[in-house]
Image (cartoon, rainbow, N blue to C red):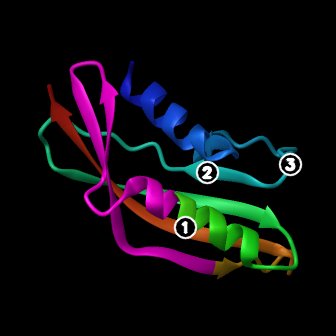
Amino acid sequence: MSKASALQTWFSSFGLTAYEETNVKASAPLPYLTYTYATGDFDGGEVPIVVNLWYRTESNVTPNAKAEQIYTAVGRGGVMIPVEGGAIWIKRGSPFCQALAEPSDANIRRRYINLTAEFLTA
């Protein structure tokens, strides 16, 4: 599996439609997840990846729970995703998650999540 396909598959595993941040349809219904598509050379060090959770709700409960689900899935030591020629090691960034307001709509709840990815050879 390619790096791009592996990232798309992994981000889609959280029960939300996942979009690369440059490929969100204007008509996409909330909730959904966006992520930066960033790759690097195998054994080339860490690459930052940002995930945004987008919800329209009056409560923080659901977006916070989804952020916690991702936090748990990554785990303390990170998670390895197999790809052609190696693996992507996804780890928690710092700070892991921040709540952000959306000025255009007070009911949009956004969670900004920092991850790092390291591309390792097999």
Percent coordinates x, y for residue 122 in the rendering: 14, 25
The quadrant of the image that shows the N terminus is top left
Query: Is residue 46 found inside the magenta-colored segment of the image?
Result: no
Tell whether 71 sits left or right of 30: left
Q: Please tell me which of labels 1 and 2 falls first in the chain.
A: 2
Percent coordinates x, y for residue 65 in the rendering: 64, 68
The residue positioned 32% from the left and 28% from the top of the image is 82
Residue 26's disc is: none
Helix, strand or loop status at disc 2 = strand
- Marks 1 and 3, how far apart in space? 22 Å
Q: Is residue 117 above or below residue 107?
A: above
Q: Disc 2 designates what residue?
A: 34
Query: Is residue 75 found inside the magenta-colored segment of the image?
Result: yes
The residue stretch that appears in magenta: 70-99
Specify the quadrant of the image occupied by residue 20. Answer: top right
Camera-near label (1 vs 3) is: 1
Q: Please tell me which of labels 1 and 3 falls first in the chain.
A: 3
Q: Main secondary structure of the magenta part?
A: strand
Q: Disc 3 designates what residue?
A: 29
Q: What residue type is labelled 2?
A: Thr
Q: Please tell me which of labels 3 and 2 falls first in the chain.
A: 3
Q: Which amino acid does label 3 sit on?
A: Pro
Q: Which amino acid does label 1 sit on?
A: Glu
Q: Residues within 10 Å of mark 3 (few under 14, many from 20)?
A: few
Percent coordinates x, y for residue 86 in the rendering: 21, 26
The residue positioned 64% from the left and 42% from the top of the image is 18
Q: Disc 1 designates what residue?
A: 68
* Tag 1–tag 2 contact (CB < 8 Å): no
